[in-house]
Image (cartoon, coloured by chain):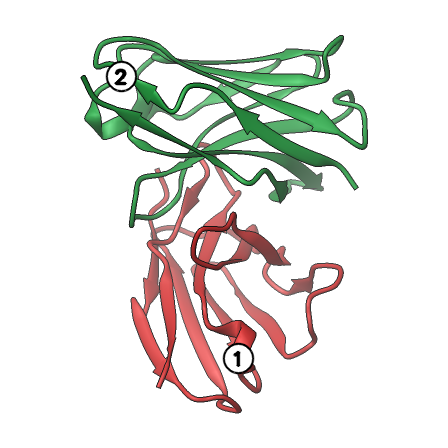
Chain colours: A red, B green
Amino acid sequence: DIQMTQSPSSLSASVGDRVTITCRASQTIDTYLNWYQQKPGKAPNLLIYTASSLHTGVPSRFSGTGSGTDFTLTISSLQPEDFATYYCQQSFSTPRTFGQGTRLEIK
Amino acid sequence: QVQLQESGPGLVKPSETLSLTCSVSGGSISNYYWTWIRQPPGKGLEWIGNIYYSGNTNYNPSLKGRVTISVDTSKNQVSLKLTSVTAADTAVYYCATATWLARNNWFDPWGQGTLVTVSS
């Protein structure tokens, strides 16, 4: 199985901050990497697919980069509704695997 | 847009079989892949497996042959069965549509999820 490791596991930030979350794969996955946002008690929502493509309706303050083994999710200017947990997910091979999550909290 | 709704017993006894249904509305079950994902309370996401409407399946080997996913095109439903459950199978279970582009696939939309507790 491909192991996905996110860092940090948790992060405190303020509204307006620029935030970057990192996801590292245990082997190369090309750009087969997706990002999700999950709020408490809710299902995850797709943010970015294929490493850098913004899903329909997702604000442009979200962006993704990377290929191979190292990927980043950046939020350019945090808004109150962005405080949530973020997960990366690889689709290079089966079984699909997720990172452990990064919890973004209000400072 | 397609909407998904999971349903099934919220409590299952150890060693018994967990059975869930995902009802699809707003679109046909045909021509899509369907996925089950679970999330133990307070923990991360685990991919269980997926199925194409034609019946082709892929499962997570970690579930060691305990899982079966099926589709009922006449009812527009996707089903999940997990046998010989233990407390470790306690989780919120989500169904989701798996979209493919080239070799990549992602999960969107998701159902709201249903909590299944394994306890005697």
Residue at 39% across, 44% down: B45
Secondary element at tag 2? loop
The residue that label 1 is drawn on is A80
The quarter of the picture where residue A12 lies is bottom left
Q: How many marks?
A: 2
Host chain of mark 2: B
**Disc 1 and disc 2 in contact, CB within 8 angstroms:** no
Left or right: B17 as drawn, with respect to A93: left
Secondary element at tag 1? helix
Residue at 53% across, 79% down: A80
Host chain of mark 1: A
- The correct choice, above or below, for A22 with respect to A88 in the image is below
Q: Measuring from the top left, give residue A60's x and y in whole percent.
A: 69, 76
In space, the residues marked 1 and 2 are separated at their CA atoms by 40 Å
Query: Of the numbered discs in the image, which one, if any, rests on residue B5?
Result: none
- The correct choice, above or below, for A81 with respect to B37 in the image is below
The residue that label 2 is drawn on is B85
Q: Measuring from the top left, give residue B64's x and y in whole percent.
A: 30, 17
Rendered-image quadrant of the N terminus of chain B? top right
- The correct choice, above or below, for A47 with respect to B103 in the image is below
Q: Measuring from the top left, give residue B47's x and y in whole percent.
A: 43, 35
* In this rendering, the label closer to the viewer, 1 or 2: 1
Q: Residues within 10 Å of mark 2 (few under 14, many from 20)?
A: some
Residue at 72% across, 17% down: B76
Left or right: B23 as drawn, with respect to B18: right
Amino acid type of the residue that numbered disc 2 sits on in the rendered structure: Val
Left or right: B88 as drawn, with respect to A20: left
Residue at 18% across, 17% down: B120
- The correct choice, above or below, for A78 with respect to B15 in the image is below
Q: Are marks 1 and 2 on the same chain?
A: no
Amino acid type of the residue that numbered disc 1 sits on in the rendered structure: Pro
